[in-house]
């Protein structure tokens, strides 16, 4: 069968959770190696989209193809970097243990980690600048270090498609820079990345494409085509402020959810 | 020496000790997951939920352990089913089933004539009444649980720490989660005879919680928990023999004392 490598194809997907539709009729195609910022207000369905892409949420309709094949046909294709609050950081594991978990998919259930697995884990730790923390307990880490542990684990998974949920929220400058550098490395390796963010400047300056979302797809394409006043008004509604200079401010602070 | 050996001159005491130590280890190992996954309430609920199974087995003259086992597995799977789609929260599902099963169990047992004695054995354990057949069954089931935990160490670690990662790695998370519930149920049932329904939760939680205070990785935590569980069982049973108190209570109080000492030690070092 012929299929184009490194490519994500989302065809008209609708996702509902507990009988409430969260995303309706979303379609888009991501070419290989592209870097896409997923932007939208809180509750727009960004995390939901990611969870669907990972295969965690069932689709009401539509389909998701990776390399032209349905989700799940490829064993270790997708890596997901969750928001930091999603795991218990007091769990008794070391940094190296967490990164090694990224290799479990390829290891099989019962096999012990091979030399290759160990080397990949070590390299991932070094690339994220946390090799010196490898034997530390994860409960000792700062927020930025926790984030880099997740990134190292995603690297160790050797994914074709990497999803990151809000990696720039509440982290220090070093971690933000490390993350952006990682994105450049991943582009060289032809890894397709989808990243949700609140930072419109960052989305406009460091990404090839922007996916603007609010319960449905508002716009998708190069930043200059997507970030128009009209599109942003449709996505953010009353949270959008137009200042005298024409600059757009989005009030996303302190939402209750 | 005489002090330690004298109780062992009775065969029932030897069997009781073997059963108690085995249960101490099993509960402590499964308890590691109970503590880390926040399933303490579930463990307690499972313990109470086996009551109707025991009662039915008793009324039909069957094996009590097998009756308990069947009830526990059914309730564990029902909880999984009710809470899976997020329609009912898991702790709500547990609350409903736990109370219903307990009520059904008490209703059944109250129809038995020697009700009071039997109920107290089920609630508080009767470790000195362990028969050779019980001991064999306990050993076989216990070995099966430990082997499963050993083989599935990595998948269980991932579904406990980060279920989302487990899903992206295409691990059968639903199956693993149910398997863990079944292992927990079997552990609870095995513990029935030693510590009784009322105190199983303590044996699941206390040694593991103590080990959690001391260990930095999962495997050492599990091993340490097992040592604490076995030690508590051993000391508890001797205390029970010499002080003439209920064995289940003696075991649990020993484990609690160890926890308090470790807790105080940790606080003191802060």
Image (cartoon, rainbow, N blue to C red):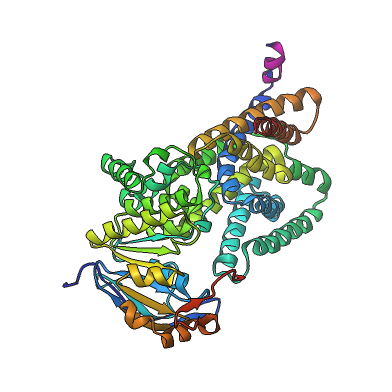
Q: Residue furthest front?
A: A245
Tell me if A182 is positioned left or right of B20 in this view: left
Q: Residue furthest top?
A: B1
The location of residue A255, given as percent across then percent down, is 59, 71
Q: Quadrant of residue B191?
A: top right
Q: Height in image: B108 above or below A95? A: below
Nearer the observer, B14 or B49: B49
Q: Residue at coordinates 66% horizontally, 47% vertically from top-left?
A: B64
Magenta residues: mostly which secondary structure? helix
State the quadrant of the C terminus of chain A.
bottom right
Magenta-colored span: B2-8
Nearer the observer, A125 or B126: A125
Q: Residue furthest left?
A: A2
The location of residue A113, given as percent across then percent down, is 33, 42
Residue A44 visible at all: no
Tell me if A30 is positioned left or right of B156 in this view: left
Q: Height in image: A215 above or below B127? A: below
The location of residue A47, given as percent across then percent down, is 46, 69
Q: Residue at coordinates 80% horizontally, 56% vertically from top-left?
A: B111
Residue A179 visible at all: yes
Residue B221: in magenta span: no
Q: Quadrant of residue A66?
A: bottom left
The location of residue B202, given as percent across then percent down, is 69, 42
């Amino acid at each position: 069968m012929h299929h184009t490598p490194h490519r994500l194809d989302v065809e008209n997907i609708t996702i509902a959770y507990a009988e409430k539709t969260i995303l309706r009729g979303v379609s888009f195609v991501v070419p290989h190696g592209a870097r896409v910022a997923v932007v939208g207000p809180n509750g727009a369905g960004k995390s939901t989209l990611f969870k669907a892409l990972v295969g965690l949420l069932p689709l009401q309709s539509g389909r998701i193809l990776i390399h032209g094949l349905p989700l799940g046909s490829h064993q270790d294709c997708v890596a997901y970097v969750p928001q930091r609050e999603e795991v218990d950081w007091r769990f008794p594991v070391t940094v190296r243990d967490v990164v090694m978990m990224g290799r479990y998919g390829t290891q099989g259930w019962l096999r012990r980690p091979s030399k290759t697995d160990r080397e990949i884990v070590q390299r991932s730790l070094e690339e994220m600048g946390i090799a010196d923390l490898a034997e530390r307990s994860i409960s000792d880490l700062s927020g930025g270090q926790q984030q880099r542990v997740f990134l190292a684990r995603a690297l160790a998974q050797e994914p074709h498609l990497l999803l990151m949920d809000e990696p720039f929220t509440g982290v220090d400058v070093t971690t933000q820079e490390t993350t952006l550098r990682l994105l450049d490395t991943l582009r060289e390796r032809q890894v397709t990345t989808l990243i949700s963010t609140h930072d419109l400047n960052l989305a406009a300056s460091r990404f090839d494409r922007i996916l603007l979302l609010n319960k449905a797809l508002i716009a998708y394409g190069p930043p200059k085509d997507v970030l128009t006043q009209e599109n942003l008004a449709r996505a953010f509604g009353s949270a959008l402020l137009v200042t005298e200079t024409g600059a757009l401010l989005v009030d996303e602070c302190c939402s209750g959810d | 020496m005489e002090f330690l050996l004298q109780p062992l001159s009775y065969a029932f005491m030897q069997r009781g000790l073997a059963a108690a130590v085995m249960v101490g280890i099993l509960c402590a190992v499964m308890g590691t997951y109970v503590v880390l996954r926040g399933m303490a309430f579930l463990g307690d609920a499972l313990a109470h939920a086996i009551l109707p199974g025991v009662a039915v087995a008793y009324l039909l003259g069957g094996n009590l352990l097998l009756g308990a086992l069947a009830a526990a597995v059914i309730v564990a799977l029902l909880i999984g089913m009710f809470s899976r789609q997020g329609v009912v929260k898991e702790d709500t599902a547990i609350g409903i089933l736990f109370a219903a099963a307990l009520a059904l169990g008490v209703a059944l047992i109250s129809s038995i004539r020697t009700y009071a004695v039997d109920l107290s054995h089920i609630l508080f354990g009767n470790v000195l009444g362990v028969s050779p057949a019980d001991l064999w069954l306990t050993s076989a089931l216990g070995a099966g649980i430990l082997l499963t935990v050993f083989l599935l160490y990595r998948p269980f670690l991932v579904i406990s720490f980060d279920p989302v990662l487990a899903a992206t790695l295409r691990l059968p998370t639903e199956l693993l989660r149910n398997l863990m519930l079944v292992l927990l149920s079997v552990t609870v049932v095995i513990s029935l005879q030693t510590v009784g329904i009322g105190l199983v939760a303590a044996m699941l939680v206390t040694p593991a919680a103590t080990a959690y205070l001391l260990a930095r990785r999962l495997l050492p935590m599990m091993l340490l928990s097992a040592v604490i569980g076995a030690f508590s069982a051993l000391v508890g049973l001797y205390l029970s023999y010499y002080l003439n108190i209920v064995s289940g209570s003696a075991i649990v109080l020993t484990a609690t004392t160890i926890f308090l000492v470790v807790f105080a030690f940790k606080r003191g070092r802060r």
